[in-house]
Image: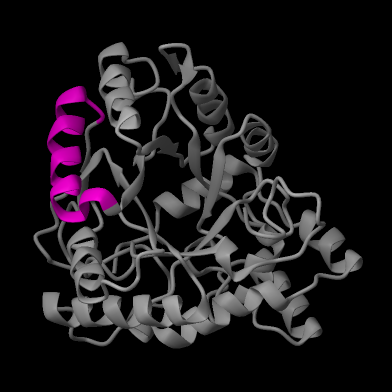
């Protein structure tokens, strides 16, 4: 266990190893992050995004990052990562997490009417896990049900649970990712699921940021139960990145960061790193400069008065997720 990771008694010593890199924003030509027209060049061909993904991965590895997050629905993210790993055989210490449950159907068109389709059936798991394993092989360490919610049946499907347990028996940690205003409910329900007397879901990839911290108590419970907690969207899909503010709350976070002399993304990620239950915090950087800025969050110590102000900026979960759902893919 790394010094300073949750579960140690060494206080809040922050390690770069608590930062992971996610390829959601660079594995496909469109996503909901703010500022994509500014951050990505006009060329979003497969080759261009493969090159960008590799540049992000190289920068992240050089900075000390060792966890990479992908998904079947992230366009060609698994393929890009597999190619990068094959070209960097010395990087044996990289841990890979992926997700199944959505299919990418955007046909590499940034203006597609539909970009992904959700399916949490046992049949979908069989098909998508085979695809993930074909690309990632024994590098795959964690496999999440992508955006598991109470209404998809993934948390109640005994046939699916047995299939997931078979994956677990082959040494792959099984978990869920969550989204929506009822993340905490999904986490607590998943913690109850056991197969052969052992907890099935031992990794949780969940949205948590200073604007939407509602899942925090449930994530603390998951960590106390021995599960891995991975935080996604710490910069709220670009709202808490430089130039991304869209509400008064976003602007207040940016102002607090400016007062500390740091960029807003660093403050937002540092706020997650201060949570003792957060094992890994995902950067969604799209270029090496953003990687460097995100990773620099490990050096930020937030004053108590700023932490108190951040606590007052949380939005009602329904409001946060309604606004997120309304964002256009670009």
Q: Which SS type dominates the magenta stretch?
A: helix
Place of residue 152 in the rendered image (x, y in percent of width and height, measured from the top left) = 33, 25
The quadrant in which residue 130 appears is: top left
In the image, 320: left or right of 11? left
Whether residue 73 is visible: yes
Report the quarter where the C terminus lies. Answer: bottom left
Q: Where is residue 240 in the image (x, y as percent from the top left)?
A: 58, 70
Q: Write down the region rendered in magenta.
A: 120-138
Q: In this view, does 274 lie above or below 294?
A: above
Q: Which of 58 and 148 is in front in this view?
A: 58
Residue at the extreme right: 305
Q: Is 278 on the left-hand or right-hand side of 326?
A: right
Q: Is residue 71 visible?
A: no
Q: Is 207 in the magenta?
A: no
Examine the image and state in which quarter residue 262 appears: bottom right
Residue 103 x %, y %:
18, 45
Q: Quadrant of residue 273?
A: bottom right
Q: Eyeballing the image, is 165 above or below 273?
A: above
Query: What residue is at 38 percent from the left and 85 percent from the top?
Result: 38
In this picture, is 45 found above or below 192? below
Q: Nearer the viewer, residue 176 or 225?
A: 225
**Residue positioned 73% across, 57% down in the render:** 313
Q: Is residue 137 magenta?
A: yes
Image coordinates for residue 250, horizontal then vertical, percent: 64, 68
């Amino acid at each position: 266990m790394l010094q300073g990771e949750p579960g140690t008694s060494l206080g809040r010593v922050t390690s770069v190893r608590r930062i992971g890199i996610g390829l959601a924003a660079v594995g496909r030509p469109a996503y909901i992050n703010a500022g994509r027209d500014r951050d990505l060049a006009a060329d979003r061909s497969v080759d261009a995004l493969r090159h960008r993904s590799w540049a992000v991965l190289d920068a992240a590895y050089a900075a000390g990052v060792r966890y990479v997050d992908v998904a079947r629905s992230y366009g060609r993210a698994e393929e890009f990562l597999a190619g990068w790993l094959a070209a960097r055989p010395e990087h044996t210490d990289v841990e890979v997490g992926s997700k199944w449950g959505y299919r990418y159907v955007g046909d590499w068109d940034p203006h597609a009417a539909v970009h992904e389709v959700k399916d949490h059936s046992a049949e979908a798991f069989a098909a998508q896990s085979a695809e993930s394993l074909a690309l990632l092989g024994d590098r795959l360490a964690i496999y999440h049900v992508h955006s598991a919610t109470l209404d998809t049946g993934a948390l109640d499907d005994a046939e699916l649970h047995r299939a997931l347990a078979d994956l677990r028996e082959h040494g792959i940690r099984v978990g869920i990712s969550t989204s929506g205003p009822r993340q905490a409910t999904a986490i607590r329900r998943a913690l109850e699921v056991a197969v052969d007397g052992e907890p099935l879901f031992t990794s949780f990839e969940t949205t948590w940021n200073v604007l939407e911290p509602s899942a925090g108590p449930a994530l603390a419970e998951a960590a106390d139960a021995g599960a891995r907690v991975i935080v996604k969207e710490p910069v709220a899909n670009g709202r808490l990145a430089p130039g991304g503010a869209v509400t008064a709350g976003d602007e207040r976070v940016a102002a607090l960061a400016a007062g500390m002399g740091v960029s807003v993304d660093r403050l937002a990620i540092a706020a997650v790193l201060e949570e003792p239950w957060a094992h890994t915090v995902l950067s969604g950087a799209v270029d090496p400069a953003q990687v460097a800025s995100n990773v620099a969050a490990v050096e930020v110590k937030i004053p108590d008065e700023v932490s108190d102000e951040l606590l007052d900026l949380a939005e009602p979960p329904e409001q946060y997720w309604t606004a997120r759902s309304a964002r256009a893919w670009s």
